[in-house]
Image (cartoon, rainbow, N blue to C red):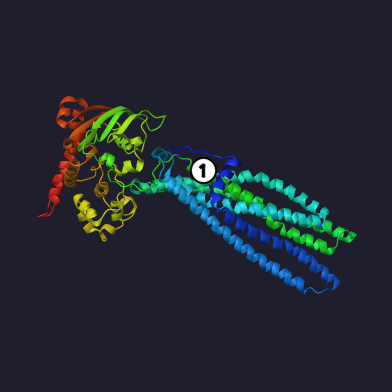
Amino acid sequence: MTAAGGDATTTRFPAGETWRALYAHFRPHRWAVACGALLTLVGAATALAQPLAAKTLVERLGSEQSITGVLVLLTALVVLGTAIEAVGAYVLERTAESVVLAARRSLVGRLLRLRLPEAERIQPGDLMARVTSDTTLLRAVTTQSVVSAATGSLTFLATIVMLALLDPVLLGVTLGVIVLIGGAVALVMPKIARSTQRAQEAVGEISTVLERAFGAFRTVKASGAEDRETAVVHEAARQAWRHGIRSAKWQSVAWSSVGLAVQVSFLAVLGIGGARVASGAISIATLVAFLLFLFYLIDPVSRMVEAASQYQVGSAAVARIVETERLRTEQFSPAAVSPAVPAARRSDARPDSVVFEDVRFRYREDLPFVHRGVSFTVPGAGITAFVGPSGAGKTTVFGLIERFYEADGGRVLVEGEDVRDWPLAELRAALGYVEQDAPVLAGTLRENLVFAAPGASEEEIRRVVARCRLDALVARLPDGLDTVVGHRGSRLSGGERQRVAIARALLRRPRVLLMDEATSQLDAVNEMALRDVVAEVAREVPVLVVAHRLSTVTLADRIVVMDGGRVRAVGTHPELVASDPLYGELAATQFLATDQQGQAEQQQGHAEQPSGAAP
């Protein structure tokens, strides 16, 4: 497993724990597996009857008796056994696919509900590899390996019994050879497991590297880094190849050992058995039957070796899947949650919208605190702006309100109730969140707009498109709202992506709107228009913004100044300029610079507007 920080750890579970994990995947399909195993056993039983029929055939040839009935019986056994085994194989293959489907559904459902710290700890590419390649390996071990071990063992024991009845001396020769070579096979099984696990980790690393490159595709190209990124992927692929080849080498040793054991046994039985026929200890028919049983012994021995090999391969995948299943997830109510305001929180005299009470928080235990006793109150409708230098903890405020993270101390209240006491789905249904990088998902523009409000009507969509100045974009796109916007919205500009993100949040009709520098990529004309929209929304619900532009800050009804993980001051723009030196410095430098840039963009936008165009 490759962690986000680059640390790689290899986990090997004890055999008992691995089998318990396997049984958890196997259990819902146990009756289908039992049916497939039974059919396989019946097919194997018909195969075991064939040497006895051949023995009878040889004896009748020697006594000049009719062989027609024996030939018919032998033919029927061959055809019937083949048909039954084919049906059994189909049942097992179908069940194996069902196991994979169930595992993938379970993993995907769990991954999308991971707590944010867990999702940030492991590379996305590695998590994707667990859903794809690891579950494919699980397919073999949960059905084929189990059935092969069971049917192979029973068939092996039945064959040994038949050989013992024919001639115990020749059986002793056969078992001696099998035990000798089987011991060598057992030594290579752990090597198969280690090589396979390392190969799977390397496959996860390939996915991680590719996900990183495609996630910053333009940056890769602009930096001329194609060759370097290609070399990184090639190295990861080479590691997967190297470990895969090593696993294949040991698996080939195991498989060739099976053939070697049977061939050496065959030669030993042929030599010693021939001597026993010559001495009169056994008949030629018995020797023929024994050799045929020895030939059929290849199948159960191969199944047992295959089962052991698949178990070693699959146990590596099982360990990675179990690790994923143990990651902490968020707990949602199984029922769908409506964003409608519950009666208990619908009172006109509802308490303050958002309150932080001496909140302390850090992202990990080995990192310093980001919040060191943050306290502030957002009383109700209006705009509250959070300002401060980089690293002051402004964006973390939103993460704690959304319960992406849990506070280490203090309380976060939304509408008078601790966020930890809210049903999580209900809490997030009450919040609208516009992230700093304004992510747009692959799909159509319509799908992105209704992503947080899938039940929105056409009229609601049309209204929010107009409010966020997206109507010109919709008119320009070839298929309007149903135009595919590309991977991460690659066919949209940065400003268009931000407007889509704002429209998506507004379409949710939130009771509290969180905006993390949501207008940073907008030109001044569009920013002014959206500022009016935000001001309109703020008359109805609280709007919390992380702001860097003076135009946004001066619009705020209250400003919270943060520095070093604490709230330094709260007030309006004129009050803070007069009373807080840090805010005055920010207003004179950072805010002023961005505001001057915005004014320049606004002037340029007016100059480029065609005559008669509406501002």
Residue occupying image coordinates x 19% and y 42%: 540
Question: Left of 9 or right of it: where is 558?
Answer: left
Q: Image height check: is 42 above or below 593?
A: below
- Residue 119: where, in percent of width, then height? 41, 41
Look at the image and tell me whether residue 348 can be seen: yes
Numbered disc 1: secondary structure: helix
Residue 389, percent from left and from top: 26, 31
The residue positioned farthest toward the right in the image shown = 279
| Three-letter amino acid code at the position of disc 1 | Val
Residue visible at 61% across and 51% down? 146
Residue underneath mark 1: 322
Residue 279 % position (x, y)? 90, 59
The answer to whether residue 565 of the structure is visible from this angle is no
Residue 277 lies left or right of residue 309; in this view the side is: right
The answer to whether residue 410 is above or below residue 270 is above
State the count of labels.
Answer: 1
Tell which of 435 and 327 is nearer to you.
Answer: 327
Place residue 531 in its image quadrant: top left
Query: Percent from the top left, x then y, of residue 272?
Result: 83, 56
**Residue at the limit of the structure toward the left, as seen here:** 612
